[in-house]
Image (tube, rainbow, N blue to C red):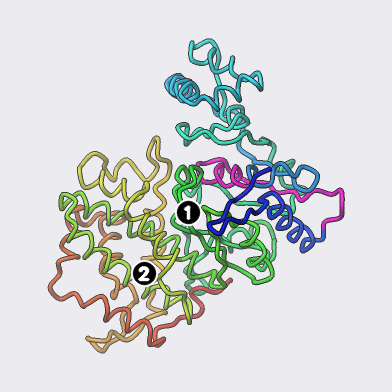
Amino acid sequence: MNHVVHSNGSVQNLNGVLEEKLDELRALIGKAEGDPLRIVGIGAGAWGSVFTALLQESYGHLRDKVLIRIWRRPGRSVDRATAEHLFEVINSREDVLRRLIRRCAYLKYVEARLGDRILHADVILKDGFCLNMIDTPLCPLKVVTNLQEAVWDADIVINGLPSTETRVEAELEPEPRIITPTQMINRATGVPMENILYLGGPNIASEIYNKEYANARICGAEKWRKPLAKFLRQPHFVVWDNGDLVTHEVMGGLKNVYAIGAGMVAALTNESATSKSVYFAHCTSEMIFITHLLTEEPEKLAGPLLADTYVTLLKGRNAWYGQKLAKGELSLEMGDSIKGKGMIQGVSAVKAFYELLSQSSISLLHPDKNKPVAPVELCPILKMLYRILITREFTVQAILQALRDETMNDPRDRIEIAQTHVFYRPALGQKP
C-alpha cells in the first residue's frame, strides 16, 4: 500500500484516494460492476507514452476496474546504435535491470547489443522503453498495434500522437477560419465536440515522468473537464480545468510559430537576455491580439498557458529549428521535416495563421493609419516569419530588423487595442 505522510503527521491512503477517483469517473460514464473502464492512448511519442505510463502507474493495479493500453504502429526497427545505448541505460539502472530479468526480457537486449537481434519499437515499449525517450525508462505498458482493436470498445481515447504528426490548418473558403485539433477530430470521427477535450501545459515529457512538479489545464465541456481534471491530478502533476477551448488550442499553435523566431533571435544575438526578453514581450502581445480576434473573452495569457508558451520558446524542436537556421546548420531547402526531429510544426503554423489573418474580408481599422488593413499588418513578427520561412523574401537576420523597428508600437498598445473587442471576428474561431 502507498501512503502519503502530510506535514501535520496525518497519513493518507493513496490507493484508497485513487480508487475513489476512479469509481467517480466510472459512475459518470455509466460503467457496470465487472466491466472495466477502458482507456487507450493513441500514439507513442514521448508525451503520449509518458501520459499513458502515468495512468498505468496510478491506476494499473486496479485491474478489475480499469484497463489501460497504448497503440503504436508496428514494424519500426531500432537501429544498432540505439540498441547499444539502450543496453547501457538498462545496465545503469538496477531497478530496470532487475525488472527485465524477472520478466525474462533481458536476453533480447543483450542479443540486440551484440547485433544478433533486431528490436522493434512496439516490443520495447511493452518493457517500458519509448523510442523517442530511451534515457527515461517507463513502467511496462500494454501495447496494441492494431488501431481498430485498440479503440473499438474504448471509453476514453487519448490523442497522444506526436505534435510532429499534426499540422495547423486554416480554411479560407467560404469564410476564413482556423481549424483546431479538436475540430479535426470531430470531423474525422463524428465524436461530438462536447466529448472532445484539450490538455496542455508546460510539460517536458521526461521531466514529468521523473516527478518534476508541473501543472496543466484540461479544457472543454464542464461535464467532462472537471471530473477528468480530478482523475488526472497527482501530487507532482496538478491539473486544473478551464472552459476556453479555442484560446488554449490556438495558443498551442501560436507558441510554435513564435518559438522558431525565438530560436533565431537567441542564435543571432549570442543568447542576449535583453534581446530575448524584448522578443518575448512583442511575440506574446501578438499572440494575445490574435486570440482576441478569435474569442470574445479569451483566457488571459497566464498560469499554464503562459508557462507553456515560455517553455516552448526556451526548449523544443521549433526553437531548435530557428537556432539551426540562424547558425547556418540547417537550410530552408531541407524542408520542415528534419531527420531525428520529425516535422517542425511551427512552419505550417506560420503559413496557416498568416494566410488566415491576411484576408481582406476580415479587415479592421488600423489605429494609427485610420484605414482598413488585414489583421496581419498589426503582427509584424508573424509577418516577417512568413516572409523568411514561406516566401523566402528575406534571410533569417531580418527577424532582428522587425524586432528593432523604430516605428514599432509598445506591446502594451497592441494588447489594449485587442481588449477593446472592436476587432473580434467570431467566424474565425467557430466550428464550420
One can see residue 351 in this view: no
Which residue is under mark 1?
167
Q: Sequence-wise, which precedes: disc 1 or disc 2? A: 1
Is 334 rendered above or below residue 301? above
In the image, residue 243 lies at what x, y percent? Answer: 57, 73
* Residue 10 belongs to the span the image colors magenta: no
Tell me if residue 42 is in the magenta stretch. yes
User: Looking at the image, is mark 1 or mark 2 nearer the viewer?
Assistant: 2
Identity of the amino acid at label 1? Answer: Arg
- Residue at image coords 47%, 36%: 133
Q: Position of residue 68 (x, y in %)?
A: 70, 44
Q: Is residue 398 left or right of residue 286?
A: left
Tag 2 secondary structure: helix
Q: Nearer the viewer, residue 319 or 26?
A: 26
Crowding near the residue tagged with mark 2, few <14, some 14–19, many ≥20 C-alpha atoms within 10 Å: many
Q: Nearer the viewer, residue 322 or 24?
A: 24
Q: Residue at x 41, y 79 (%)?
A: 362
- Relative to 150, say whether 417 is above or below: below
Name the residue type under label 2: Met
- Structural crowding at the residue carrying mark 1, measured as other residues with C-alpha within 10 Å and reported as few (<14), some (14–19) or many (≥20): some
Which residue is label 2 attached to? 287
Seen at 33% across and 56% down, the residue is 313
Residue 310 appears left or right of 274: right
Q: Say which quarter of the image contains residue 147.
A: top right
User: What residue appears at the point 86 percent right and 48 percent down from the top-left corner?
Assistant: 34
Q: Which residues are magenta?
A: 31-55
